[in-house]
Image (tube, rainbow, N blue to C red):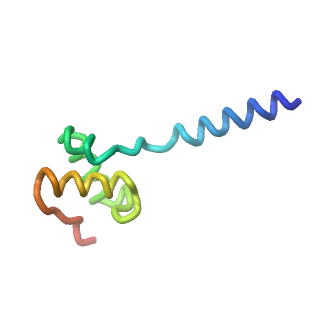
Amino acid sequence: MKKIILLSAVIASFLLTACNDKIYTVKEFKEDKGLRDKYFQKCNNGELKPLSDENCINVMNAKIATDGFTQWSSR
């Protein structure tokens, strides 16, 4: 019985963590313009929360460093 509970807990934690997007670093965003543009768009259109999502914060820092100043749309 303990093995079943332990196995269930492991499977549940795997499924919960597998659903989250990877957190990209500023360096990764700087090096990959396509990735940078994709995540900037997600943050800009409200798919992700620009002020609290780590990827939005990192993509904005990368865009400032590579493309100059940008801002989120005025929604």
Question: Is 66 placed left or right of 54 in the picture?
Answer: left
Q: Is residue 35 above or below residue 68?
A: above
Q: How many marks?
A: 0
Residue drawn at the location 34% of the way across and 62% of the way down: 50
At x 23% / y 65%, what residue is drawn?
72
Residue at 17% x, 57% y: name it: 64
Horizontal side of 11 relative to 2 (left or right) equals left
Which residue occupies the foreground of this view, 31 or 17? 31
Q: Residue furthest right?
A: 1
Image vertical order of residue 8 relative to residue 62, above or below: above
Q: Position of residue 24 (x, y in %)?
A: 34, 44
Figure quadrant of residue 25:
top left
The percent coordinates of residue 41 (x first, y second) are: 25, 53
Q: Quadrant of residue 75?
A: bottom left
Q: Position of residue 71 (x, y in %)?
A: 19, 65
Residue 61 rendering spot, x and y as whole percentages = 24, 56
